[in-house]
Amino acid sequence: MITIILVFIIVNILTGQADPFIIVEEKLTSITDEEKRVLEELFKVIQEIDILQNEEKKIAQEIKEIKQDADVLKNQIEKEEEEYRKKQEALGQILRSYQRMGPASYIEIILKSDSLASFLRRINIIRDLAQDTGELLEEIENSKNKLIAKKNELEENLVFLEKRNRDLNDALDKINELKYDLENYIANLGEEKAYYKDYLEDMKNAWTEVKIIFSNAAKDFSVIVQNTELSPEDLNLSFSIYGVKAAISEEVINNIISNQPHLEKMLVDFQPDKVKIELPERKLILIGNFAIQGDNVLIFIAEEGSFYGMELESSSLEELFIENQLVLDLKSMLGNNSKLKSVEIKEDFLEITIEWNFFSMSQGGELFDRS
């Protein structure tokens, strides 16, 4: 079993291990096109296993939480059932008392009053008794409804639990199948199998680390953009009856990045209808577009990508953004009164259209209020 290629290894320079990016860079410069093709196929399988293992952990955690919720519901149902039983017993006692005394008894009690005050007091006691019976009936009905609702919720949770258990078993079956296929693939490489095992181990180390690096870079980048104010010249503003247009060049964005020495080196390249995000030192390239989120936020949606020239699966692209999204929060640049209407990527710049805010302007506010 070649378990070495199926185990995550987080490389830390402090441990004295070599930089995985340097190792991969050195090895890839000396391989043939055919060797790279084989490695790409193997790396695809590694990505699939990686994603399925993460999905397995996610489902297992979800199953654990569903079971905990089910236990809580069971306890609540037991308490509701006990409360329901007590109220039924109390009602039964009252009804039995009514039955023993009969309506004539109550009339006799009232008529035997020796004074007006006694008469009124007895009337009120009987009225309160009848009212308490009505309230108890209402409480019993409410307890019954709560009990039914909680039982239905528990039943739904248990049905969902069964489904997630099936999903977990399917994921485990697929992982084992992929591991088996990978082992057979490498075994059939003959004398070169050790050679490719080393490549895969290095690629996996680098891929594990780049996911962490990119996630942190996306978070830092988003915070920096949010706290950056640009001049009207940087925004290249133009006005029309449809609203205000701003054109932000890739040079402006890249200057913001380069002015932050602690930020991972990142290059933004605006091309017609697409955005290219590159971490050049990590050989990671992502291509996608921006989508509007809320009033002032653009969120990057990766549509394709590569790592050391090897194609990334869609599930691997999603994995890069699990912890942190790459966003452009333009509120500080555009002002509180702005609202994004559309976004278009053109050669070398990002063009956005902002809706006119007639109400704010009629109140004497500025379109790009910096307050």
Image: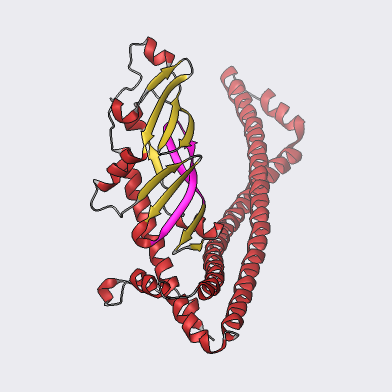
Tell me what residue is drawn at x 45 percent, y 19 percent.
Answer: 243
Tell me what residue is drawn at x 42 percent, y 67 percent.
Answer: 208
Q: Is residue 113 depicted above or below 327 in this figure?
A: above
Asked whether residue 85 appears in the rendered view, the answer is no
Residues rendered magenta in the picture: 283-303
Q: Nearer the viewer, residue 48 or 26?
A: 26
Tell me what residue is drawn at x 30 percent, y 25 percent.
Answer: 232
Q: How many marks?
A: 0
Residue 28 horizontal side relative to residue 126, left or right: left
Determine which quarter of the picture holds residue 336: top left
Asked whether residue 314 appears in the rendered view, the answer is yes
Determine which quarter of the picture holds residue 269: top left
Tell me what residue is drawn at x 52 percent, y 68 percent.
Answer: 50
Location of the N terminus (image quadrant): bottom right
Q: Nearer the viewer, residue 121 or 329?
A: 329
* Magenta span dominant secondary structure: strand
Q: Is residue 110 depicted above or below 163 in this figure?
A: above
Q: Furthest residue to the bottom?
A: 191
Residue 343, percent from left and from top: 48, 33
Location of the C terminus (image quadrant): top left
Determine which quarter of the picture holds residue 135: top right
Q: Is residue 98 depicted above or below 118 in this figure?
A: below
Residue 182, percent from left and from top: 58, 78
Residue 159, percent from left and from top: 68, 58
Residue 288, percent from left and from top: 50, 47
Q: Nearer the viewer, residue 173 or 263?
A: 263
Q: Is residue 175 part of the magenta span, yes or no? A: no
Q: Is residue 289 part of the magenta span, yes or no? A: yes
Figure colour scheme:
secondary structure
